[in-house]
Image (tube, grey):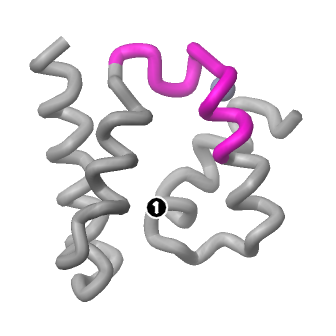
Amino acid sequence: MMPCDQVTDRLWAFIDGELPDDEVQAVQEHLEVCGRCFPQYDWDRAYTRFMHSASVRMTSPALRRRVFEALLRESMQSG
Ligand SMILES: [Zn+2]
């Protein structure tokens, strides 16, 4: 499995859709089983909402990042 530091290095590229498919898979698999990378967030819920938001795909990488960070914060606040 990909180590935590490599996952966090790739996280924004993953969210931005800039990772090659094999690395996307490795990051996804890691996040499914690892409680250390984002223990304070409801990662799955935030990411699912992010991916289902059609408007997100039309925005710039920088804006997508801000949207995702906002969803993560919201997940954290709602417990
Ligand atoms: Zn990890």
At 15% across and 46% down in the image, what residue appears? 70
At 18% across and 78% down in the image, what residue appears? 55
- Is the residue 43 above or below the residue 77 in the image? below
- Is the residue 35 above or below the residue 5 in the image? above
- Is the residue 65 above or below the residue 38 in the image? below
Observer-nearest of 9 and 42: 42
At 34% across and 25% down in the image, what residue appears? 42
Where residue 78 sits: x, y (%)? 12, 18
| Residue neighbourhood size for the residue with mark 1, other residues' Cα within 10 Å, grouped as few (<14), some (14–19), many (≥20) | some
Horizontal side, residue 69 vs residue 19: left or right: left
Q: Is residue 30 magenta?
A: yes
Observer-nearest of 23 and 47: 47
View extreme (right): residue: 1
Number of numbered discs? 1
Q: Report which quarter residue 1 is drawn in.
A: top right
At 83% across and 39% down in the image, what residue appears? 2
Q: Is residue 44 magenta?
A: no
Where residue 49 sits: x, y (%)? 27, 50
Horizontal side, residue 56 vs residue 44: left or right: left
Horizontal side, residue 39 vs residue 65: left or right: right
Where residue 9 sits: x, y (%)? 62, 49
Give the residues in magenta.
28-40
* Residue type beneath disc 1: Ile
Please give the residue where the numbered disc 1 appears in the rendered image. 15
Q: Does label 1 point to a residue whose CB lies under 8 Å from ligand 1? A: no
